[in-house]
Each structure stands twice: as C-alpha cells, then as structure tokens.
Image (cartoon, rainbow, N blue to C red):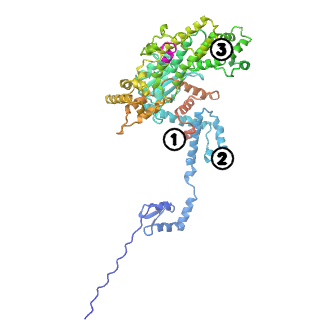
Amino acid sequence: MPKRMLSPKAPAAKKTKYLAKFNTSWKSEFNWCKASAKGTDHAYCTSCKTDFKICYGGRNDLTKHMETANHQKAHNSISSTPSVSSMFSSGTKVDNVAYAEVLFANYIAEHNCAFLMADHFTDLIKAMFPDSPTAQKFACKRTKTTHIITQALAPHWDSKVNDMCRTEKFTVMIDESNDKGDNKKLNILVRVYNQTLRKVSTQFFGIPTCNIGTSSSIFNCLNQVFIDRDIPWANCIGFSSDNCNVMIGKNNSVLTRIQQMSPSVFNVGCVCHLANLCAQKAIKTLPLPVDDFLVDIYYHFHHSSTRRENYKQFQEFTETDPMKIIKHCNTRWLSLERCVQRTLQQWPALKSYFQSHAECEKPGRINRCMQHFTSDQMWLYFAFLEFVMPILNDFNVMFQAGESMIGYLHTEMVRLLRKMMGKFVTTMTITAQSDITKVDFRCKDNQHDNTRIAVGMKVREFLSDNDDLAPQTVSNFFSTVREFYCTMTETMIKKFPFQDKVIRGISFLNPLSKDKLSPDEVVSLSDRFLNYNQQETSQLEDEAAEYILTPLCDLPAFDPDTPSLNQFWTSIGNLKLPTGKLQFQHLFALSKVVLALPHSNADTERTFSMLKKIQADPRDNLADKTIHSLLSVKINNPTDCHQYKPEPELVKAAKSACALYKQSLS
C-alpha cells in the first residue's frame, strides 16, 4: 500500500518588534535630554545639540549616548563655563541686596533717623557681617536712601491711599500749623476703610504749604491736592478740623466750600477741642488767676539752674518728693489737670521757697507767687480743680484714641453731661427730665446745698480741719463752685451736638446702645451717606431691625473693656445665613462709611508732633517733598520695620529710582 504523502510544514510566524518612545520621566535622570522635534522615536541632547534615535534601545540608547566621548567633552565644557546672567547685577543676590536696602530706608523713615547716618551704616554693616554676600554688596548711603523713600516707598503708599479714596467713602481732616520755619503747613489726613487691614484707619494725604490762613486759600490748597491725586469729591462724606469760624463757620468757611463740592459732607467737629473750651470758660469764673499762677511758677524756675538747685533744699526740708515743675499751656487739652496735681504735690516746698525768697516783698512775679501760696482760697481752688478736672480729661482721653470711637460719641456726651450735672444738681431733678439738656440746673432749688455739693475729699477735710476760716471765705468758695459747674454745664449744652440726629443715629455702631434706636434712624443715615435704591433701602431696614432685635449674646463677641468697634463690625460683616448669603450685607456697608467719620481732630495734632521730630534742628532744611514722603511712609505703613515685607514691585521700583538717578548724573 503506498505511503500517504504529508503536506509541507508551514513556516513559523515572525515576532512583532515594538519601538520605544521618549519617556518624559527620563529627564529627571538624564538632565541633558529632552523631547526631540523629530518625533517620539528620537531624543535631543542639550549638551551636544543633536538628535539621536532611541526607538530601538530606549533608555539604553540614552546611556550609550552619555558614554560617548563627544558627549563627555560637550557636557564638561558647559559645566565649567559660567552663565551669562552671572555677569550682570540682576541675579538673586542683588535682589536680596535691594530688598535689604528698601527695609533700611523704611527703618530710617519710621524712626526719624538722620539721612547722614546711612553713610556710616553702609560701611558698618560690611564690617559686622563679613561672611554675608548681601551685607558686602549693601550700598545705601544718604542719597540713595533719600531716593528710595521719595521715589519708591512714598509713591507706593500714596498710590494705596489713592486707591482707597477712589473706591471707598472717606472723611478729610485738616489743621494748620506754623511751628517750624517761615511757612505754614496744611496737614491733610483721610479716614477711610482699609480693605487690607479690614478696618477703618487714618491715612496721611498731604502737607502742602499754605501761608494765607483765609478759608479760600485753605480750600484751594486742599482742592489742589485732590486734583493732583485724582480723588473725587463725591466720595468725601465727612470733614473734621478745629472749631474756628474759618474752618467750620456757617458762611464762607472751608466747610461751606467743601459742601458745594459734596453736599452730603458732615461736620463732626472736634469734641476734644470743645471739652477744652468748656474747661477754659469755667476756669474764668474763678476769682483767682489759676492759669497765670501756674505759668509764673514754671517760668520762675525755667531759665535758672541756680533757682532749681536752691529749690531742692526746700524739697528736702519739707520732705517733698523731688519732682519737676510742669509747664501749663492752655491749648494742651490735658495740661491743666497734670499741672494742678503737680503743684499741689509740691505745695509745701513751693510755699516755703517763695516765702523765704529775698525778693518776696518786691512787686513782681515772686511776690505774686508768695501771696497765692499763702492764700487758703487758692489752695481750695486747686484742690477742687484736682477733683473735677479728671471728669473732662477722661472724656478727652477716650476720644483722642486712634481707633474709631464715633459710635460712642452720643452716649458718652450724655454721660459726661449727666456726670457733671450730678455734682451739683439733685438726682430727682435730673431723672424727672427725659431730655437732660432741658434740666433747669441754674435754679437754686434744684441744686444741692453746701454740705452735699461735690467738691472732693481734700476740700472737705481742709474745711473740717480749719474751723477758723472766715465764713465769708467759705461762702464765696461755694458760690464760685456753683458758678463753675453752671458755666461748665451751660457751655457743654451750647457747644456739644446733643441734638444732632446723625450723631444719635450713629450710636447703632455700639451694640450696647442699639436697643435705644429705631430702624428708621439707621436707615436715615443711608439716605445721607449712601446712594441706595428703594430695594436696597428696604433690605437695609430689615437688617437694621434684625440687628436691633437680636440679643447681644447671639451677636459676635464684644468686650466693653476693650471697645473695638472695627473688630466687632468686621465680625458682623462675616456673618452668613444657612443659605450662604451674608446676614448683614447692607448694614455692614453702612457701618464702613459711618466708622470713617472722625470723633476728634487728635490725629492731625499727632501728625504735627511727628513733623516736629522730623524737622528737628539737625535736619530743618528738608525739602517739602522729602517731608511729605517721610510722613507718608511713617503713617501709611501699618507694619513695624522689623516685620515689614516689601512687595517685589516696590523693590523693583526702588532699583529703578536709583538707576534713573545715576543716569541723571552721567
């Protein structure tokens, strides 16, 4: 049987070859390679500047390329060659130097240091830190420091203030001074909500020269600053100054001119000035010249070291603590109380000194002082003033604060009047009248008798220990005290804005006083300061009613001992409903506006104190631009010099300012 033929065997199938593709993870291991423009089957060598295939060996092809002689030569050449950027002064180390120079310039401005100090400091820091590259490259002498402050730091902060005033409602505060030099300065501050700090703060705005003190001249200076800085008058909602007619008079004053530009501008006035005026007027009712007496004492010792040395012997003899005689100045709000207290403390030594003086019998200052120190009546008035003046001064201290205190103003004015009236008017008379300003305090039947009228424990003890005092002297003293209280109360009612509806409405800011207001009183503030439409006004009214009716325990924490209205209202503004909607959106917007209203003019007075330190004798020739720049940096920068971190743009501006100055010299 024939064998069966077998079919030929089919050939085996070839294996599929897979080509490798470039993997970006290789760049971390081979820092000289990157993806090739020729495709994923190639790699590019940054050292050799060439493409090569990696599709067959993949990572193995990279290793083989790295081991080639050409690659080794190219890579070693690049590693040993410095970069071009290191040849220029714009590297990281120089940026650190510029950063340090800005910090140093900011320190100079904050601490009123002389620019001349920068010359030696630049050399000193090199000696102090020889191992520091930044210190060795630090070069910020007086000229460069001046340019950084005037061309970079001050414009930086001025720009921030401009942005605030263009986007938020603000109050302008001004005051004049001629304390230094031949030119009068017009100090201009603004009080505005600071989004960065999340609170209302006082910002420096300008200090132009204004030698003519008329209302038109002052307003023109102020208006020019607004024009130069492109600030709209429409955003100005308040004005504060001292209380002279040129500033706030009803006709042709600075205030009336501002109200022509922005009719809604509200004048608060300076309650600290008003309180001081009340005190001065009451002092004039005393039959003895207390003010002149204090001035005589001070100037007797002021110009003579011999007299001061002789006086020390009388202090030792009378066992009186050796303390300095304080100068009294009528324009200083807190001066009288301190001077009266110090004089009473030094009374035994001063009395003995002037009685023993060789010229005590000759007409003149020494004789006047001797007579006053031997007068029981003068001592009684000094003891009475020591008792009564703290009432006014506590009020003044409260409203000299830099924090916004406008929400407390109406409550504290009423409290001050009630406290002063309670010293000499019966409690029944005060409580019987719902409006305390309507109390008939001059009626003798409504006043305490001499045994109950408030004069202080020192006076009562003195009268008790000196029964031999003439009855007429005692009677005259109590009559004078009554007139003092009446004049003080009468002046307060006349000068303080007790009946101002705006001041009363602003009391809603104080959570402890909110129950005394109606929602309508709060809404009326928006009609003046905000341009709300009907819907927004309705929403504000609902929010005001909810705020007034909400128990204090359900609102953000508020500590009466540290009354920060800014912090409280920031917390109010952050409250949200379960839906995520802000609970008091419109009420918070109103609070930001009315918190910007100033409660006094103390901030401008503080600025002049800063100016006095800046224009000290060693640097009294500073240019106006430099003075403006120093004040701008000092006031507008809220951060201490050791915590301040300049923005990169500011450091760049400082470098540019110095570069431009160098170009101007070439």
Rendered-image quadrant of the N terminus: bottom left
Q: Mark 1 points at which residue?
A: 647
Q: Name the residue under label 3.
A: 296
Q: Where is residue 310 in the image (x, y as percent from the top left)?
A: 74, 18
Whichever of callouts 3 and 2 sits on the residue coming sooner in the sequence is: 2
Q: Mark 2 points at which residue?
A: 130
Does the image show residue 580? yes
Whichever of callouts 1 and 2 sits on the residue coming sooner in the sequence is: 2
Q: Position of residue 611 (x, y in %)?
A: 58, 27
Give the residues drawn in magenta, as a range: 417-426
Viewer-side residue, 487 vs 87: 487
Say which amino acid is labelled 3.
Asp
Distance CA(mark 3)–CA(mark 2): 59 Å
What residue is rendered at 67% in x and 44% in y? 127
What residue is rendered at 61% in x and 36% in y? 143
* On screen, residue 372 above or below 147: above
Specify the quadrant of the image occupied by residue 463: top right
